[in-house]
């Protein structure tokens, strides 16, 4: 939905099971019109559309895309962002590290993303930019630490395909007038996990290769300045709040580093990680381990990042493995990659990084780094039984929590500004 503060707010439809276009379309028709009626009766309601590889191919067959466009117009709905991270199945099967397949070293990932861009350009309202979030290039554990050449090859091949994508997005803009950006999404154990790794990839790989390739194009040659602007415009970052909280990066510091490097934030995914404070008495941690074990399920990766009493971080590839180390004497906190609901901060005596989401919403009042906000709580199916709620109600509660916090921070910022102005000494 479009908010008065200037944001497009939605939720990501990756929470709905369904890999075929018919399943996706049925989910849209089931969930979106009632949500719009409840939350945005007088204004258009935005959609964060997730299409699998299969659904993206099926949607471009026959007259399906024009029919979707017509239905969206009838319902006063619009698509402004897409989730292009999961390529294949995302529900009711073991996903784990397969979510990174195929990675950005492959032509399959490039072709899939180009299809999504064509769909988005067709559905995107005039005068609005569109974004597609994507994987952080590849999955680190697939690359042996000692095999530096292999890692360099992955960086180089990924950069090559991303530059080819920029070329396609430039052509798409020339044909349609629509600006589409791809938003790289750092996450735990991704080849890009944090702001430093993103900045390094831009500076060491993407910019050197992209500036050269875009200036050498025969069809649409660019100057060096135009090539640089094209790269920064069409390759941006998806700031998933849960993922950056797992890296223990404070939002203000991450925003400042990215801004200094010239990297733009195309979308903020509003999500919270599971947080666990570990008592000093290691023998009392058994009950915590039992509670944490209810979150150790077989569908998704739930990496754990542990902080010790000296501030050092240790990363575990999945919760089931981390639980074996919960009695480490110097460990003081765990953060777990489990997108828990935003609207509560307590989960069976565990906590969440909800405060990072609130801080991001506060920072947006001071520096509007993006207009695109997307709630990405996708773990409803795999939550412990006593935390599961009706899905429609859960989606609405998430969005209402965000709206409430945006309004609260907006009013607080405006109130502070008015207070400061009221106490200024007038010029004489």
Image (cartoon, rainbow, N blue to C red):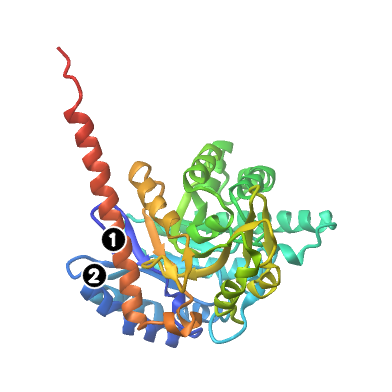
Residue position marked by numbered label 2 in the rendering: 39
Q: Is residue 63 visible?
A: no
Name the foreground residue: 320 vs 258.
320
Residue furthest toward the top?
428
State which quarter of the image contains the C terminus.
Answer: top left
Q: CA distance from mark 2 to mark 1?
A: 10 Å
Name the foreground residue: 8 vs 222.
8
The residue tagged with tag 1: helix, strand or loop? Answer: helix
Residue shown at 70%/72% (left/top)?
324
The residue tagged with tag 2: helix, strand or loop? Answer: helix
Q: Position of residue 57 (x, y in %)?
A: 52, 79
Residue shown at 62%/65% (left/top)?
304
Lateral position of residue 306 relative to residue 129, left or right: right
Lateral position of residue 377 relative to residue 202, left or right: left
Q: 413 above or below 74?
A: above
Tell me whether circle 2 and circle 1 mark residues in contact (CB < 8 Å).
yes
Circle on res. 283 = none
């Amino acid at each position: 939905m479009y908010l008065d503060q200037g944001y497009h707010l939605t939720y990501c439809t990756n929470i709905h099971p369904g890999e075929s276009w018919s399943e996706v379309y049925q989910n849209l028709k089931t969930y979106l019109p009632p949500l719009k009626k409840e939350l945005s009766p007088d204004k258009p309601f935005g959609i964060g559309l997730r299409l699998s590889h299969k659904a993206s191919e099926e949607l471009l067959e026959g007259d399906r895309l024009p029919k979707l466009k017509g239905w969206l117009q009838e319902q006063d709905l619009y698509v402004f962002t897409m989730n292009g991270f999961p390529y294949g199945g995302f529900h009711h099967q073991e996903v784990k590290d397969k979510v990174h397949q195929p990675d950005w070293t492959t032509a399959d990932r490039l072709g899939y993303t180009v299809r999504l861009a064509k769909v988005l350009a067709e559905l995107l309202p005039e005068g609005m930019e569109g974004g597609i979030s994507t994987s952080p290039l590849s999955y680190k554990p697939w690359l042996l630490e000692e095999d530096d050449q292999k890692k360099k090859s992955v960086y180089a091949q990924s950069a090559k395909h991303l530059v080819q994508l920029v070329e396609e997005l430039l052509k798409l803009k020339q044909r349609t007038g629509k600006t589409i950006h791809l938003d790289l999404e750092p996450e735990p154990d991704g080849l890009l996990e944090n702001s430093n790794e993103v900045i390094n990839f831009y500076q060491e790989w993407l910019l050197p290769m992209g500036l050269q390739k875009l200036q050498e194009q025969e069809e649409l040659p660019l100057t060096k300045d135009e090539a640089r602007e094209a790269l920064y415009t069409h390759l941006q970052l998806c700031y998933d709040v849960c993922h950056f909280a797992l890296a223990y990066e404070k939002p203000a510091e991450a925003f400042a580093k990215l801004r200094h490097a010239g990297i733009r934030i195309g979308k903020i995914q509003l999500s919270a990680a599971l947080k666990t404070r570990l008592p000093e008495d290691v023998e009392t941690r058994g009950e915590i381990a039992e509670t944490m074990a209810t979150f150790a399920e077989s569908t998704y990766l739930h990496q754990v990042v542990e902080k010790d009493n000296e501030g050092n971080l240790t990363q575990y590839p999945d919760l089931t493995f981390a639980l074996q180390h919960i009695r480490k004497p110097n460990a003081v906190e765990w953060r777990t990659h489990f997108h828990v609901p935003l609207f509560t901060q307590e989960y069976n005596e565990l906590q969440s990084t909800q405060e990072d989401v609130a801080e991001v919403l506060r920072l947006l009042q001071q520096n509007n780094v993006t207009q695109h906000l997307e709630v990405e709580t996708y773990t409803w199916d795999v939550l412990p039984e006593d935390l599961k709620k009706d899905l429609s109600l859960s989606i609405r509660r998430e969005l209402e929590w965000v709206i409430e916090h945006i309004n609260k921070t907006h009013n607080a910022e405006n109130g502070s500004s008015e207070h400061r102005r009221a106490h200024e000494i007038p010029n004489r």
